[in-house]
Image (cartoon, rainbow, N blue to C red):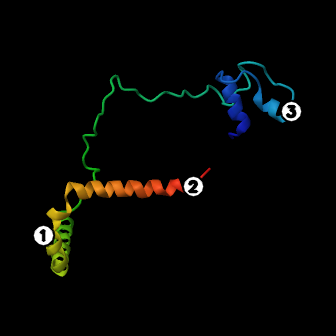
Amino acid sequence: MSNWANNLDMLAQNGVIDYDAASYVMGQPMRYVGNPAAPSPFVGQSPASPLPIQPKTDEFISSSDKSNIIKTPSWKKWAFGILTASVLVLGGLKFKSKIIPMLKNLPKTLKLDNVGDFFKNGWNKFTKLFKGKKP
């Protein structure tokens, strides 16, 4: 059975702490001082804790097994394309009276002066928010 005292004993056994932390917490006399040979929280030899295998160089190794990749069926791709195209066509027909005049006026509205004025006026509005406030 593993509990907090066994965990503290394992820390002492592996040299992380050098005292009997469980007896210190419980206010009991020390069972051992330093790296203990006993009591071992394991019955028999302690299990080895191997490190994961590290690569020799820093590289990405892709999995050659492509069977676990989820692939979208082609009928779903076609259905999405048809749905998207129909929404665009129906939206264009419905808002044709608003889109065509807007496209005709687009070169007039995209003058550099208008873009500069937009940012200048926006900055002025932003700075006015802080001018009226005093600390």
Determine the secondary structure under disc 3. Answer: loop
- Name the front one of labels 1 and 2: 2
> Where residue 11 appears, x then y in whole percent?
67, 27
Label 3 Cα crowd, 10 Å radius (few <14 / some 14-19 / many 20+): few
Q: Amino acid at mark 1?
A: Lys
Residue at (79% x, 21% y) in the render: 32
> Where residue 107 appears, x then y in whole percent?
14, 62
Q: Earlier in the sequence, mark 1 or mark 2?
A: 1
Residue 71 visible in rendering: no
The disc placed on residue 27 is 3
The disc placed on residue 104 is 1
- Name the front one of labels 3 and 2: 2
Determine the secondary structure under disc 1. Answer: helix
Q: Earlier in the sequence, mark 3 or mark 1?
A: 3
What is the quadrant of residue 95 in the picture? bottom left
Q: Earlier in the sequence, mark 3 or mark 2?
A: 3
Label 1 Cα crowd, 10 Å radius (few <14 / some 14-19 / many 20+): few
Q: Amino acid at mark 3?
A: Gly
Residue at the spot of label 2: 133
